């Protein structure tokens, strides 16, 4: 089945202006009072979750393993007038592609779950190598602890409409595999006059990881106590009630 990340235009369809503004406000709150000027997002994708940082005045760089996503990101950056350095890189090999350090290194879009838990730890170490002493490590993720406990199978996000009236819907069916991984089966439907005229089918094969594993590794690396918030952050909630969270911690 097709990989969604090979189709950046389809990937971008569901990212609305409202989501853009929500993430912009989220970053304003999360980064407030922190001495951050330079940021590297090592899961840049097409830039949806990172361009708000450029708008806020941060000096942004990006990397991603997907060439099609980066090509789309570069096109969008040019259209927006942003001078953003983009490098194709696996986040498990990040330090071999960057010879500078940053005030903050991020992994956005719940990208870490695309690798095993042991490789998540490897990615965190690589991110750490690119962070200036006293800088910050940040990532966002689905709450995999809650997902594995709840084992919800069917997720139907709110549909939205294109300018020509086309209604774009999405259905996710989650398979909980015997090896502990999760396969998300995704169907995008395109509808006009109450008739579906096209569908796209994709799969994501993901490796849930526990937040406790991340906390333990950050403690071993000497990071300060992590700040954990919903993503995007509108109000505080107990961790068990957060579907998507971000974690931010300061390097010694």
Image (cartoon, rainbow, N blue to C red):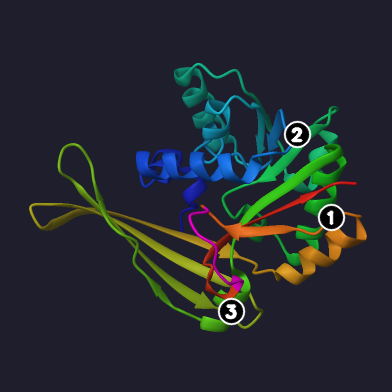
Q: Position of residue 159 (x, y in %)?
A: 27, 56
Residue 126 vs 148, above or below: the answer is above
Q: Secondary structure at mark 1?
A: loop
Residue 89 located left or right of residue 80: right
Observer-side mark, 3 or 1, equals 1
In-front residue for pair 106/240: 240
Q: Secondary structure at mark 2?
A: loop
Residue 153 vs 139, above or below: the answer is below
For the residues labelled 1 and 2, the Cα–Cα distance comes to 15 Å
Observer-side mark, 2 or 3, equals 2
Magenta segment range?
233-239
For the residues labelled 2 and 3, the Cα–Cα distance comes to 36 Å
Q: Which residue is mark 1?
A: 224
In-front residue for pair 145/169: 145
Q: Is residue 238 magenta?
A: yes
Residue 231 located left or right of residue 166: right
View extreme (left): residue: 193
View extreme (front): residue: 33
Q: Residue at x 44, y 66 (%)?
A: 185
Q: Quadrant of residue 119?
A: bottom right
Q: Position of residue 108 (x, y in %)?
A: 61, 47
Q: Which residue is mark 2?
A: 35
Q: Which mark is residue 148?
A: 3
Mark 2 and 3 residues: CB-CB less than 8 Å, in contact?
no
Q: Secondary structure at mark 3?
A: helix
Residue 29 located left or right of residue 153: right
């Amino acid at each position: 089945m097709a990989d969604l990340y090979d189709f950046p235009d389809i990937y971008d369809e569901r990212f609305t202006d409202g989501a853009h503004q929500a993430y912009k406000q989220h970053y304003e709150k999360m980064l407030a009072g922190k001495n951050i000027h330079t940021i590297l997002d090592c899961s840049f994708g097409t830039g949806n979750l990172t361009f708000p940082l450029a708008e806020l005045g941060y000096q942004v760089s990006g990397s991603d393993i997907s060439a099609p996503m980066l090509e789309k990101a570069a096109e969008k950056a040019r259209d927006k007038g942003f001078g953003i350095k983009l490098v194709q890189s696996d986040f498990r090999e990040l330090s071999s592609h960057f010879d500078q350090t940053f005030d903050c290194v991020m992994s956005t879009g719940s990208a870490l779950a695309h690798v095993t838990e042991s490789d998540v730890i490897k990615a965190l170490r690589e991110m750490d190598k690119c962070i200036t002493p006293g800088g910050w490590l940040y990532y966002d993720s689905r709450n995999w602890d809650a997902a594995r406990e709840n084992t919800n199978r069917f997720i139907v996000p709110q549909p939205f409409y294109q300018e020509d009236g086309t209604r774009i819907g999405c259905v996710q069916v989650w398979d909980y595999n015997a090896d502990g991984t999760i396969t998300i089966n995704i169907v995008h439907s395109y509808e006009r006059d109450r008739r579906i005229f096209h569908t796209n089918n994709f799969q994501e094969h993901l490796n849930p990881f526990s937040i406790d594993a991340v906390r333990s590794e950050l403690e071993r690396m000497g990071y300060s106590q992590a700040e954990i918030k919903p993503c995007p952050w509108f109000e505080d909630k107990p961790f068990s009630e957060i579907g998507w969270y971000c974690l931010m911690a300061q390097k010694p």
